[in-house]
Amino acid sequence: MSNSTSLWIPDSSPLFFYSPANSYFSNLNLNSWIGKSTNSPQVSEFNVTFPDDNNNYHSSFGNVAVILPSIYATAFTPIFKASEKYNTTFELASYGKIPWASGRSWKTSNDDFNLQTFTLWFDCLDVENQCNKDEIDFLGAWINTKFVPDNTEIDIVEIDDSSSIIKYEGFSPINQNNKIVEIDSKIDFEKTLSMTSKEGSKATISFNGASIEIYGVTCSKCGEYNIKLNEQISTFSSFNNLTIHNSLLFFNTNLDTNNLNTIEIESKNGGLILDKIQIKGPKGAVNFIGNQNDTTTTFLPNSNPTSTSTSNSTSISGNSNNINGNNISGTSNNTPNAGVIVGAILGSISGIAFLYYLCRKIAPSIKKKSNKKLNSWDEANLLQNMKNEQVHVTTAANQRYVYPGLIAHSNLKK
């Protein structure tokens, strides 16, 4: 059974790199893109569906391109509008460009689950006017990917940015207005955002799972950030001339489910705004792991919130689709209780005294089992009494005849 699943990546996601991004399009003389929200293309204008709340898009004209690099996928379906004045082509990695249309899908077999790089090129055919009156609208793309290995059930756990198991360095206190963006209570998860405009600020968390998604905000005051996942570093930019909440800031899958993963998000320049983190993986093997006051805390998927704690660890079960670390707490002190220690010692002493009393009182009354008494004839023959067995000797003479050397040592008389 395949676990290939569709994931919508909106145009606002920093997973997309738009021309003239130096990392991919330097020295190609391509135009830039801008984010728009007015006169948004409608679902009815396309031959494929996408989320109804996707009212934003990126727009440009002339010669432009957009790339989705290094992503695990078995299918890619871009959604865009471009007139006949453009030669629109699709390129997989560097295998060459082929004509493409909005809603058309590139697909490979589910067994061919590898990193892929997808690029859309828009080349203006109107050389004289440079297509300056024919804009291109790019809305995003569907990909087919695998959140968990094949033939396994899926668990999902997500935590809010306010969770205390996320280790922050340089971020503003939760819910404090630091002048980057305002919280949108209708969109932002748990109505909170964690923000920073300080270069080098970090957010770190560890987890067990097969895939991870990080959501946040893209905006005009936002900038570049690094993602370090298990020592592999990638750089993205959350800059957008529009403020877009619930943007997919990062996605990765095909992670090793047998090892603990650690992810670190670090701001490079400009603002960085986080909203929530979601992980997916095989049932029973998905959790976030953090450290609170030297206490290890684990967030598990469970429909019935419960919590258990020990002197050095806490296990938390919460809603698999809505877990807020601020509402869940465990022990934060590793010092044992003195009363518990004294009680344990007194209990041990009492138990030993009771066992000693039993040994002294009862043991003497238990009689040691005696060996069976030998009769006179058996003594003469050095034979034990045995159940259902007897030695029949009729006369002393016969006995002497049979055992001539033994009769003198018995009570038998000649």
Image (tube, rainbow, N blue to C red):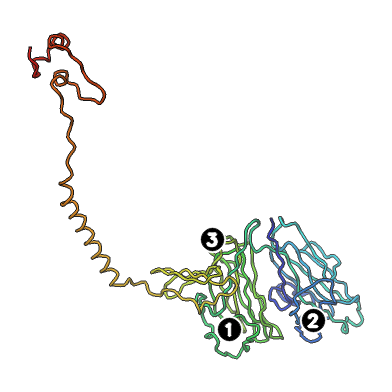
Image disc number at residue 259: 3
* Mark 2 surroundings: few (<14), some (14-19) or many (≥20) residues within 10 A: many
- Cα–Cα gap, marks 3 and 1: 30 Å
Query: Which amino acid type is marked by label 2?
Result: Ser
Please determine whether, in this image, residue 40 is positioned above or below residue 116: below
Query: Which amino acid type is marked by label 1?
Result: Thr
Q: Earlier in the sequence, mark 3 or mark 1?
A: 1
On the image, the x and y values in percent for residue 389 come to 25, 22
Please determine whether, in this image, residue 372 is positioned above or below residue 278: above
On the image, the x and y values in percent for residue 12 come to 71, 79
Query: What residue would you read off at disc 1?
Result: 192
Q: Nearer the viewer, mark 2 or mark 1?
A: 1
Q: Secondary structure at mark 1?
A: loop
Image disc number at residue 59: 2
* Mark 1 surroundings: few (<14), some (14-19) or many (≥20) residues within 10 A: many
Please determine whether, in this image, residue 378 is positioned above or below residue 401: below
